[in-house]
Amino acid sequence: MTDTIDLAALTAWLYRFQQLAAENRSHLTELDSAIGDADHGANLDRGMAAVVAALDEAPAAAADELFKRTGMTLVSTVGGASGPLYGTLFLRLGTSLGAVESASPAAFGAALRAGLEGVVQRGKAEAGDKTMYDALAPAVAAFEGAAASDASATDAAHAAFAAAVAGRDATVPLVARKGRASYLGERAVGHPDPGATSTALLFQALDETLATTPAER
Amino acid sequence: MTDTIDLAALTAWLYRFQQLAAENRSHLTELDSAIGDADHGANLDRGMAAVVAALDEAPAAAADELFKRTGMTLVSTVGGASGPLYGTLFLRLGTSLGAVESASPAAFGAALRAGLEGVVQRGKAEAGDKTMYDALAPAVAAFEGAAASDASATDAAHAAFAAAVAGRDATVPLVARKGRASYLGERAVGHPDPGATSTALLFQALDETLATTPAER
Amino acid sequence: MKKLINSPDDVLVDSLRGYAAAHPEVTVDLGSRVVFRTVPKAPGMVGLVSGGGSGHEPLHTGYVGLGMLDAVAAGAVFTSPTPDQVQAATARADFGAGVLHIVKNYTGDIMNFEMGAELASAESGTQVETVVVADDVAVEDSSFTAGRRGVGTTVLLEKIAGAAAEEGQDLASVAALARRVAAQGRSMGVALTSSTVPAAGRPTFELPDDEMEIGIGIHGEPGRSRVPLASAVEIARMLVEPVLADLDFTGAPAVVLLNGLGASPLIELYLMYGEVAKLLEAAGVQLARPLVGNYITALDMAGCSLTVLRADDEILRLWDAPVATPGLRWGA
Amino acid sequence: MKKLINSPDDVLVDSLRGYAAAHPEVTVDLGSRVVFRTVPKAPGMVGLVSGGGSGHEPLHTGYVGLGMLDAVAAGAVFTSPTPDQVQAATARADFGAGVLHIVKNYTGDIMNFEMGAELASAESGTQVETVVVADDVAVEDSSFTAGRRGVGTTVLLEKIAGAAAEEGQDLASVAALARRVAAQGRSMGVALTSSTVPAAGRPTFELPDDEMEIGIGIHGEPGRSRVPLASAVEIARMLVEPVLADLDFTGAPAVVLLNGLGASPLIELYLMYGEVAKLLEAAGVQLARPLVGNYITALDMAGCSLTVLRADDEILRLWDAPVATPGLRWGA
Ligand SMILES: Nc1ncnc2c1ncn2[C@@H]1O[C@H](COP(=O)(O)OP(=O)(O)O)[C@@H](O)[C@H]1O
Ligand SMILES: Nc1ncnc2c1ncn2[C@@H]1O[C@H](COP(=O)(O)OP(=O)(O)O)[C@@H](O)[C@H]1O
Ligand SMILES: [Mg+2]
Ligand SMILES: [Mg+2]
Ligand SMILES: [Mg+2]
Ligand SMILES: [Mg+2]
C-alpha cells in the first residue's frame, strides 16, 4: 500500500508489463490472428523486451526519463499500429510527469489522461471503435475518479484495472471501425480487440505492482 | 484358330490394346508414380484413344498403312519416353509387313523382330535395364520360335503373351538403368516397370484377339 | 511450418543480407533495415521512399533502382517499419528537392510514416509529401473506418512516379501524378491457402481444402466472402466484377497487373490472366500494358490478385520509361 | 488440389492463351503448342529451339525473345513434347543457318527431340545441332544409365547461347559454346513439399511435415536422401557441397543461380542465396553474376535449387548482353 508512486514502483510497473506481455505473447497473437494479422503479441513482446533491456543497462533517474525512453524504444522497435500508439502513450506520460522521482495519484492520473489524449491524436479512435482506446479510456477515467476522491494509488490502480478489463470485454460484441479489424465488418463481432487486451495487461501490471510492497516485487 | 493373321485381326488387336490401356490407365500411372513421374497410364491411354479414333474415321486398307498410322499417331500424341518407343515399334511393324492384307506367323514374327530392333535403336535398352524391352524381347523371341516350329498364329501369340508376362515380372527385383527409374538406384527394386507392364498388355491383346473368331470379337 | 529459414526472428535480416549480396546496385543498411541505391540520384532530384512490412517481396525492396524508388524502410514481416527507419530512408532519398512517401493504407504504416516524416522535417528540414494507396475494393470505402487497404496499385504507382522523378519533375508534380495513379487504380485478390508468418509458426487462417477466400488482404486479412473452390473462369469473374463496379475503366487505356501472392506457379498466373483479359475486354477495357507475375506477395500464400489502373498517354509514357530494379526491369 | 485452373486437361492450352495475351512480342500456336518470336530473327542467323514438359515456367516459354530462344515446343505438364511439335518449333527457328536444339537430359525429351530433328532434316533440310544438359549432381553420373537430369544450367545456357546466336555466331560456334556451358554447370535441389500434377490431382510424393527431400528432380523425381527439416545454413551446405565436390569452381568467375521451385517466396530465396554465397565464397568461388528467383520451377513445389556455372570472360560478356524475354530481361 502506498499513497505516492515512486520511481521504483513506476519502473517495476514496466518490468511487470514486460513479463505479462511475454507470457501473453501467443494469446495476443492468437487474438490478432482472428481479426488482424497475427503479430500483436510479437510486436508488444519485442518492444517491451527492448525497454527492459535498456533499463537493465541504465536505470532511469526520473519519471520523465523513464517514460520517454520507454516511449522512444517502443516507437523504434515495435512498428505496426501499436508501436506509435503505445509509444505516444508513454512519451506523454513522461512529459506530463516531468523530472520527478515520485507522483501523487492525482498527478499520475493526469499523466494517464495526457497519454490517452496522445493516443487519440495519433489514432483518431473514438469510443466503440473496438481498439485499445476502449480499454484505455475507462481505465484512465477510473484512475482519475479514484484519485479525485482521495483514494490511494493502490485503490486507484485496482479500479483502473477493473475498468480496463470491462472495457476490453465490451469490445467483444463490437464491429471494428479502426485498425485492421475494420476490414472484417460483421466478422469482427465475437472477438476481443488485441490492443484492448494488451491495455488491460498494462493496468493489471499497474495494479499488481502497486498492491505489493517493494520487497515483494 | 487361324494360320494367317488377316487385316481384321490386326485391327482388332489394336482396338483390344486400346481397351486394356484404358482399363489399366490408373494402374499403369500408379506403377509410374512409384518409380517414374506418374504419367505412363495417361500417356498410353491418350495415345491409343487417338489411334482408335483415327481408325474409326477411316479403317486402314493394308497392314503397312494400319501400323504406320498407329505409329505416327502415337508419336505425335504421347510424348514422353513411351511415345517414340511404342511409335517406332508400330512404324517398323508396318514397314516390315508391307502393303499386305494378311500375314503368316513367320512374317508377323519377323515384323515384331523389326519392331523390337527399332525400340532398341531408339532407346538403347539392354536386357535387365528394367524397361519395356524386358517384356518385349522375350515375347518377340517366343513368337518367332513358335512360328519357326510351325505353330499356329494363335499358339504363337499365346506363347508370346506368357513370355511377356514372365519378362514383366522379372523386372520387379531389378535396379533400373534406363529411363526415369534409373535416378532411383536401389529404390527402384521391388516395383515392376510400367512400360514392361504395358507391353504385357499389348501381347495379352494379341493373344485374346487371335484366340477368338472374328464373330466373337 | 516448412520454410527456408534459420530462425523466425532472423528471417528479415538474413534475407536482406542475401538481397544485398545478390544486388550490388542496391545497398542495405542491416542496422536500420533500410535499402537504398548504391549510386544515388543527382542533387536537385525528387526522392521516392516507400516501405512497409516485409514478406511482400519484390515489393518494396525489389523496386529500389533506376526509374523507381530511392530508398525503402523494411519493417518486420507483415509489420510496418518504425519512424526512425522511415527517417533514415528519407535521409537517403533527400537530394534537396523533397521526398515523396508512398504509403499503403494500413493504420500502422500511416502512423509510422507520419512520425517518420515529422522526424525528417524536424531534424533535417526535408520537405515530405505523402501519397496513400487504398485500392483494395474488397473493403468497403468509408471515412468512418481505416478505409481500404493498399495493394497492387502500389507497384504501378512506384513505377510511374519513379519515372517522373527520374526525368526531373518537381515534388509537386510527382506527388500530384502519384495521387492521380492512386485514385485510378483498383484491386481485388483471392487466396487458395493462408500464408504462414514465421514468428507465428502456423497458418494465419484455416481454409478448408474445398474453399477459397475472395477479397483476401496481403497480410491474410479476411476478404468479402469464403466460397467453394471454383474454376479459373469463375474466379476471374469474382475479381473483375467488383473492380469494374467501383470505377469506370472504359474509354481509356488500362495497365493490368495479374499478380501472384507467392505460392502460385506462373503457369496458373498466365492462365488467370487469360481469363481476366477476356472479361475485361468484353467489358470494353483497353488492355494497354499487361503485367503477370509475383509483384506484391503475401509470403507463401497461394492465390492471385488483379489490379487495373485507368491510364492515359502520360501514364503510359512513364510506364514505358526505362526501369532497372531487381524486381522490375526494362529498357535498361 | 487447389489450383487456379479450369480443368486438368486444359491447363496448358489455357495458360498458353493467357501467355500470348500478356506478351504480344511472342506468338503462340495453340494447335501445335509452339511459342515463337513475333518478329523473327534476320535470315542467316542461327536459331535456338528448346522445349520439354510444361510446368517449369518461366522455362522454356518465358525465354523466347531477343537474346535467348527463337521457338519452344511446350509438352503436356511434365511430359516431353512430341517430334512434330519439335519439328514445328524448328521450322520457326530456321533462318537458313541451322538450328540448335537445347534438350534437358530425360529419356523422353532426348528421343522426341531426336525424332523431331530427323523430321526437320528430312522434310526441310534443316541442319540441327543438339546440346544436352545433364547437370543435376543428385544423380550419379554413369554412361550405363539415363545419366543425370537436366535442370538449372539450362536457363544459363539458353541465355548465353542465345546471346552468341544474336550477335551472329555460326551454328558450330554456338553449339560449341553451348556444350562448354553444359559441361561447366552443376546443380542440386531441395524440396520442402511435393508438387501436384493437375492430371494426377494429388501430390506426386508424400513428404512428412518435418522432412525434406535433398536432390529432388524438377518433376518430383526422388533425390539422394530424405532428411529431417533443417535450417537454411544446413540446407545451403547440403546444396553447395555436392556441387563443389563434382567440379572445381575455383580460379574462375562463376554465374550462380539460386532458383525457386515454384511455391517458395522471394524472401526465402534471398535468404538462401545469402547462405549459399557465404559457403561458396569461403570455398574460393568468385560470385561474378548472381541470379535469384523462380527461373526453372516444378509447378507448386516449395524448395529451391542451386546452379553454379564455371564461367570465363567470354561467357560473362555474353551473359551481360541485352536480353528481352518475359522471363529474363536486362539491357533492352
Ligand atoms: N487508430 C487506432 N487507434 C487506436 N488503436 C488502434 C488503432 N488502430 C489499431 N489500434 C490498435 O492496435 C491494435 C493492433 O496492434 P498491432 O497488431 O500491434 O498492429 P498492426 O495492426 O499494425 O498489426 C489493435 O488491436 C487496436 O487495439
Ligand atoms: N531407353 C529406354 N528404352 C526402352 N524403354 C524405355 C527407355 N526409357 C524408358 N523406357 C520405358 O518407358 C516407360 C515410361 O514411359 P512414360 O512414363 O510414358 O514416359 P516418361 O518416362 O517420359 O514419363 C518406362 O517404364 C520404360 O519401360
Ligand atoms: Mg497486428
Ligand atoms: Mg512417366
Ligand atoms: Mg502488423
Ligand atoms: Mg513423363
Image (tube, coloured by chain):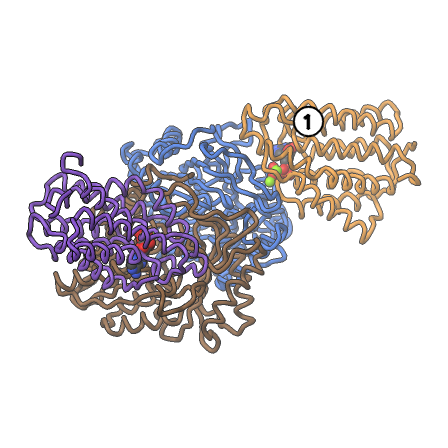
Chain colours: A purple, B orange, C brown, D blue
Residue D306 visible in this rendered orientation of the protein: yes
- Whole-percent x, y for residue D295 in the image: 44, 47
Relative side of D145 to A24, left or right: right
Locate the C terminus of chain C by quadrant. bottom left
- Whole-percent x, y for residue A50 in the image: 20, 43
Residue at x 58%, y 31% (from the top left corner): B181
When asked about the image quadrant of residue A217, the answer is top left
Up-down relation of residue B75 to residue C95 (above or below): above
Q: Of residues D57 and C135, which is closer to you in this image?
A: C135
Q: Of residues A137 and D243, which is closer to you in this image?
A: A137
Relative side of D210 to D18, left or right: left
Crowding at label 1, few (<14), some or many (≥20) Cα neighbours within 10 Å? many
* Residue beneath disc 1: B134
Q: Of residues C203 and A146, which is closer to you in this image?
A: A146
Up-down relation of residue C92 to residue C194 (above or below): below
Mark 1, secondary structure of its residue: helix
- Whole-percent x, y for residue A82 in the image: 27, 53
Relative side of A175 to B42, left or right: left
| Disc 1 residue type (three-letter) | Asp
Up-down relation of residue B56 to residue D17 (above or below): above
Residue D41 visible in this rendered orientation of the protein: no
Relative side of B116 to A18, left or right: right
- Whole-percent x, y for residue D103 in the image: 52, 43
